[in-house]
Amino acid sequence: MQDAILVENVGKHFQRYHAERPLTLMEAALRGFRRVKPLEKRWALRNVSFEVAAGEMIGVIGHNGAGKSTLLQLLGKVAHPNEGRIKMRGRVGALLDLGAGFHGDLTGRENVFVTAIVTGLSRREVARRLDRIVEFAELEEFIDNPVRTYSTGMMMRLAFSVAVHTDPQILLVDEFLSVGDLSFQSKCLNCIAEMKEQGCAIVLVSHDVSQVERLCDRALWLKKGTVMAYGEPTVVAGQYTMEMRSQTQQRTPHHPIQLSASGTELRVNENRFGSMEVEIINVQLLPASEINRSDGLNVTIEYLASKPVEMPIFSVSISREDGQVFFDSNTQNMGITLPIIQDKGKIGLQIERLDLIGGRYFINVGIYAADWEYAYDFHWHVYSLTVKSNICGTGVLSPPCQWELKSLARSNTKS
């Protein structure tokens, strides 16, 4: 099978300059030219090699600063490598940033035309696909409103819909599938599966190792710009998870058993992990820990930071009793950069509707270091959620739907 993407010994570095670098020729002449030269080169990527065949999907995992986004920028030709070579065969559809390229003052319709034409489609081709793009994004009522009035979820839906409806042979996705409601996530995953079957090569950057294991044919683990592991997703994801767990456990202090607000025991390194630099002191599920399948859910996390902590990442996931994760969202993926936190505080996540089949689930909450290297505090299978539904099934999602019986016209036959 022919490779759609070939990356061979790629390296990318950035220059670090003096903090008081002259900005003009006059300043350089007066202060001396020594501060004009770069102080050092910092390698964001070094000796990275892999290939992706048509119809394959590779997952790229690693902490913040590992070089994942830099790699996607090189593949998307936003930047160019300093070493090695990259070969791309086919039209590229890139989701490198949420809503990147959208102009806030233009309407959704106008942004669709601009973005799709930039990818290589003609205006006539965009016009033919416009209805499908809008319908997939579920924005029929808002497509003629300025994009600056859109929520993050609306921008995500529109950006994804444009990207997948421009017939890309290569799709680059940066931390995208964990944003949005469960129903739209399911639609995105189905769309990506169809694109794979049609021969599209896909590169997915994700911090969610279970997602990489589930979706990808191969995985690439980057650490400080170098390849730590490359191969079968289950093997690579397992190695990455073990290192992250090891880093967290090394920082987890001995802590007596505590009780959550609901009375569940919190046991260190069993259902609670982390350095405890920031502690989760309470989690509230509103309206209650028992909801109907079509209800929304508000998860409020109360925390205590004993000392200042810079740019923490808060996460919420939903899993079944067997550990299978069906929803995973965090502040970083939503484009939220938190300030320094200290003392007591609260943060909340509002999920408009879950649409899960009836059963028992768990809300898992965590607070992580800015680079995802380890957890400050993570509670696993502590907060139970019961979803009530009169619909039975073997799947997980239960979105609004209805059957419609249509009569078939009988053909008249002559004897």
Image (cartoon, rainbow, N blue to C red):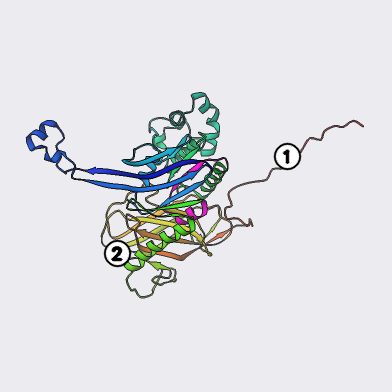
- Residue 64 lies left or right of residue 176; in this view the side is left
Q: Nearer the viewer, residue 26 or 135?
A: 26
> Does residue 286 show up?
no
Residue at x-position 48% and y-position 49%? 352
Picture coordinates of residue 73, whole percent (x, y): 37, 41
Task: Measure how far apart labels 2 and 1 are at the Cα level.
Answer: 61 Å
Q: Amino acid at mark 2?
A: Glu
Residue at x-position 76% and y-position 39%? 407
Classed neighbour count for the residue bearing mark 1: other residues with Cα under 10 Å, few (<14), some (14–19), many (≥20): few
Q: Nearer the viewer, residue 202 or 129?
A: 202
Q: Quadrant of the N terminus?
A: top right
Picture coordinates of residue 284, whole percent (x, y): 42, 61
Secondary structure under tag 1 reads loop
Which residue has dot 2 on it? Answer: 277
Q: Is residue 403 above or below residue 149?
A: below
Rendered image quadrant of residue 98: top left
Classed neighbour count for the residue bearing mark 2: other residues with Cα under 10 Å, few (<14), some (14–19), many (≥20): some
Give the magenta part as a residue range: 197-216
Numbered label attached to residue 406: 1
Residue at x-position 82% and y-position 33%? 411
